[in-house]
Image (tube, helix red, strand yellow):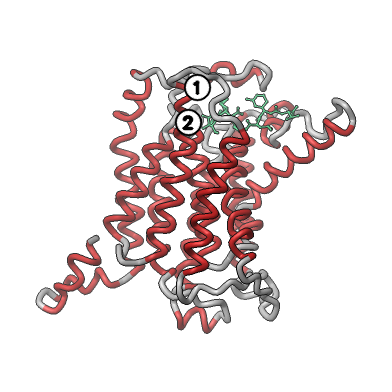
Amino acid sequence: MFYNLLYPLHTSISAFNVFRYITFRTIYAVLTAFLIAFLLGPWFIRKLSQMQVGQYVRDDGPQTHLKKAGTPTMGGTLIIFAVAVSTLLWADLTNFYVWMVLLVLVGFGAVGFMDDYLKQVVKRSKGLSGRGKLVFQSILALITGVLVVSHPGFNTQVTLPFFKHISPDLGWWYVLFAVFVIVGASNAVNLTDGLDGLAIGPMTIAAATYMIFAYVAGNIKVADYLQLQYVAGCGEVTVFCGAIIGAGLGFLWFNAYPAQVFMGDVGSLSLGGSLGAVAVITKQEIVLVIVGGLFVMEALSVIFQVGYFKLTHGKRIFRMAPLHHHFELKGWPEPKVIVRFWIIAIALALLSMSTLKLR
Ligand code: 57M
């Protein structure tokens, strides 16, 4: 909004020229989102407690989790609010991709909100059915995929990390590919969200990585120099990624061990979906497997565990899936699992960034 309202005035007030720069606006998007989440956090947590939106904890999980029962959840609502307000203030509101990522953020947030609301407020313990969630997520991702692919200038080639000469063109199949990336990312982040700060830490790291990818892909000179696909207009998504970093850090303040609040499905589904949408828009789709490698590891641990469990009628590969429970049951204290998983996420983010050069 500032870009649209104030930048045009730079001809009379030259200081307003600064609003032209994506880098400047991104820094302020980080700070604005951080302050919103940080300052509203205590009030928001109190409201959630008053409304008795407290977490129900399953008794078949690690015993250390039983003491977490009643922790306020649905903190993701505050994350979405902070990201949306900050993006609306600092991004160019005539930019198509900005509206696409906001659509995914709010749309997937609404699906998660419904699930949490049924569980926490209506006290329907299972919330939305798994299939119900998947249908809503797929419809939203399909709409996003169709709109993005129809946007003039967006090409349907897939970028492969490390191989600059191989970029298969999927044509309209790209829409289904985009649905897979967005819905997959959303659910993988949701599965990871099972220890204090375990999802929001790596999410913030992934947003920082895509902040760089978005800037690079949206800048014709830098994209050309690095021989990356240039996506006209996707530079504005840098501001959105910055807002996720800020809101993520603000939320982590309260979600750090021992957590005063959980994000709920409203947070995990919307953040994961947004990350997938950013990967699609910046044309760094496959590299998401590395950037979000931790989320992928967690999701694969569930797939293998459930598959093996069914095939062998009750045998397990891990002590418990998702993977973080396995290490908890091996006796690692919760903060150790969390910080070690963050370390892995940082290493993977660095590895993914090396693909900008190693091509
Ligand atoms: C949600 N939700 C947390 C919180 C958070 C197929 C199956 C593997 C699915 C999986 C599942 O349901 N995963 C998705 C995981 C829950 O957190 C809430 O959910 C939101 C995210 N959607 O924001 O509102 C619990 O996680 C803990 N937590 C924290 N700190 C946080 O910041 O400590 C969350 C956020 C909270 C809290 O304890 O209550 C969850 O884990 O339920 N299912 C599972 O994860 C279950 N795994 C399982 O059944 N594994 C089986 C195989 C054969 C499928 C096995 O390995 O034997 C486990 N989950 C739990 N107990 N809680 C097992 C038992």
**Percent from the top left, x then y, of residue 329?**
72, 26
Which amino acid, mark 1?
A: Gln
Q: Is mark 1 within 8 Å of ligand 1?
A: yes
Which quadrant of the figure has residue 339?
Answer: top right
Quarter of the image with the C terminus in it: bottom right
Dot placed on the residue nearer the N-terminal end, 2 or 1: 1
**Percent from the top left, x then y, of residue 256?**
48, 34
**Pointer 1 residue:** 55
Residue sitting nearer the eye, 166 or 179: 179
Q: Is mark 2 within 8 Å of ligand 1?
A: yes
Q: Is residue 83 left or right of residue 61?
A: left
**Within 10 Å of the Cα at label 1, are there few (<14), some (14-19), or many (20+) other Cα atoms?**
some
Can residue 241 be seen here?
no
Using the image, tell me which numbered label, if any, was put on residue 262. Answer: 2
Q: Is residue 204 shown above or below 126?
A: below
**Within 10 Å of the Cα at label 2, are there few (<14), some (14-19), or many (20+) other Cα atoms?**
many
Q: Is residue 35 shown above or below 113?
A: below
Q: Secondary structure at mark 1?
A: loop
Q: Residue at x 90, y 30 (%)?
A: 312
Which quadrant of the figure has residue 229?
Answer: bottom right
Using the image, tell me which numbered label, if any, was put on residue 219. Answer: none
Q: Secondary structure at mark 2?
A: loop
Which amino acid, mark 2?
A: Phe
Q: Residue at x 65, y 74 (%)?
A: 169
Residue sitting nearer the eye, 340 or 210: 210
Can residue 191 be seen here?
yes
Residue sitting nearer the eye, 293 or 184: 184
Figure quadrant, ligand 1: top right
**Percent from the top left, x then y, of residue 181?**
61, 55
Q: Is residue 72 shown above or below 186?
A: above
